[in-house]
Amino acid sequence: MSVIGAHVRATGALIFACAVGCLFSPTLLASDDTCPEWTDERQLFFGDLHVHTKYSLDASTQGTRTGPADAYRFARGESIPLQPWLENGEALRQLKLERPLDFAAVTDHAELLGEREICNSPDDEGYGSWQCKLYRHWPRGAFFLFNTQAARAVRMGFCGEDGEYCRQAAMRPWQDIQLSAEAANDRCAFTSFVAYEWTGAAENLANLHRNIIFRNAQVPRLPFSFIDAPSAPALWDGLDARCGLGTDLPACQALVIPHNSNLSDGYMFVLDEVNTELGTRRAEQRSRLERLVEIMQHKGASECFFDPLNTQDELCAFEQLPYGSFRSKFVGKISSRLSEPAQSDAGFLRDVLSDGLAYAQQDKENTNPYTLGVIASTDTHISAPGAVSEDDFPGHGGAGQPAGQELPPGLPDDLEFNPGGLAAVWAEENSRESIFAALERREVYATSGPRIGLRVFAGADMPQNLCESDEFARQADQHGVPMGSELTLEKDGAPVFAILAAMDVGTANSPGLPLQKVQLIKGQIGADGQRKESVVDIVDSGVEASVDPLSCQIAGSGAAQLCQVWRDPDYDPQSRSYYYARVLEVPRCRWSQQICVAQGVDCSKPETIQAGYEDCCRADHRPIIQERAWSSPIWVHQAKEGAE
């Protein structure tokens, strides 16, 4: 097997050296203004497309005072102050990335942009309202009041007739968000996108949230919020009406990225009836705008549902939440008996991908509304994109602590939360045009934090010696298509996959961990409509590794690189299928367990459990995790008879 030549550039991106072979399938052609490092063989860049700053009301009520410009500076390697704050404005904590990111997008909530601004601006109409006084003096109470109203698509009373005061006030932060993105965008070195979050909710507070990423600086006058568009189809219609050809902003282009489907209670991916005029239009619209989905962030993973009593894939238990909606989370604070866990039909990605296959099978146009590539991000609420380390996790909020107070002792965040993940992109250069094009064509993947390298290709045939080749990706691309693509097989046969994964090299202070195995997950809809799902171990390191939860010491090892060419022996030519790769590191201690160990907690010895660290010994605490990467799927089907 060839050795991956990899290094960490100043931006922190892991590059697969062309000694191994790089992708030769250009989407953007070289021109006079391309970057010096531009290559049609494509490079790997890491970023975070889900970032909240002080302009998000939930972040500000938790003590976040830093803005978009601070977030972009942090992404590029500068330190950032973290709450709590002293009376003189000095922060009690600081945070800095060991490795900067290559790209990022601040995605503050569109709903309440103006309300938060008014409550912080003494000269604004509404500043003296009782709601704003609540915001300034009891931020936790304001968190629930303001967000409950926004979830109902209702403005606060001080917003004036038709919400005009709040709309006008929202212009100021929206302008700052745009200007900060423009100032941070450093072509060829760092990419920033103008973006926001549409924070939709179902009646039971099930999550419908979506991040809107714009390709360039031509964006609507104000973000289109849940108050303006209280459903996902209304959001798509609003974007189509305001952004793109035929509108006042012809150069405007947006991607819509659903997130947290594990908290959507099944509402995130509701389809209109197949083969109706509305259903056809919505399926096309969804597949055009929603090219990606967020498979993981700090509120858990949405890959697949885990049922401890009936599971064929125990790895689905990774970062699963103990509740299925925001309402269940909050009532669970009162009584765990009132909190309802997620159900099997809650909207986990594998089921959604299979729903798309089933829809396409019935649709006369063969439209699959759910050809979703995958990314991960943090959903940070402290303006800290890319802060995904398990070693020094500061939490995603400040618990609403008043100025001058220390954080309470104990874990810095709710036990079920995690640091979040990263979006990985294969692009010709580090620019808005190139990275957005990669997102759009779905040549992207997700990691739970580590900068694991991953390439996946599929074709009707692949050279069996690809893993020994110095041109792995170039040859694989010549014989097939990369992750995120659709593969049409022209004759009877089976798809062949070429998969190459490399461990995160880490840093001198925090070296990366080796890989344990690579798996391929397959979903299939047969001609009879029956669904099948399988998980195949494609290649294993062959070395055992384990971790001692009482010391967090790792025993054993894994592989620096794993590679395999694999033909599906069970492929059904009459079926529609999707395949994606899952790469697993060797196990390590989770962030929570690292803190528990550092505090000397031994759950077998009650005297070691200090105040604030009781969660270390909860029955649902998972002290050990396996970090991972997920590729975007490749969809496979046979060509229709007679098709040219």
Image (tube, helix red, strand yellow):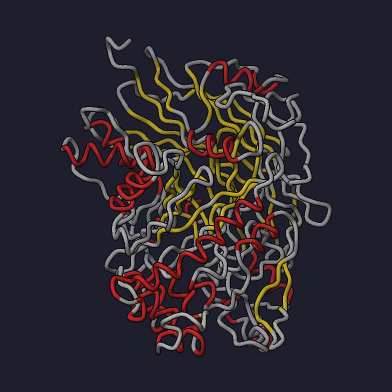
Quarter occupied by residue 604 = bottom right
Farthest left residue in view: 276
Farthest right residue in view: 508
Q: Position of residue 200 (x, y in %)?
A: 35, 61
Instruction: Report the quarter where the C terminus lies.
Output: top left
Number of numbered discs on residues: 0
Residue 397 position (above or below residue 52): below
Q: Nearer the viewer, residue 159 or 440?
A: 159
Residue 446 position (above or below residue 168): above
In the displayed structure image, the side of residue 479 where residue 333 appears, left or right = left
Residue 607 position (above or below residue 432): below
Quarter occupied by residue 363 = top left
In the displayed structure image, the side of residue 583 where residue 487 appears, left or right = left
Q: Residue at x 74, y 67 (%)?
A: 551
Quarter occupied by residue 611 = bottom right
Q: Position of residue 446 (x, y in %)?
A: 56, 46
In the displayed structure image, the side of residue 245 where residue 317 appears, left or right = right
Q: Residue at x 75, y 64 (%)?
A: 79
Q: Position of residue 148 (x, y in %)?
A: 35, 75
Q: Nearer the viewer, residue 355 or 102?
A: 102
Q: Position of residue 260 (x, y in %)?
A: 43, 57
In the displayed structure image, the side of residue 582 where residue 190 appears, left or right = right
Instruction: Report the quarter where the N terminus lies.
Output: top right
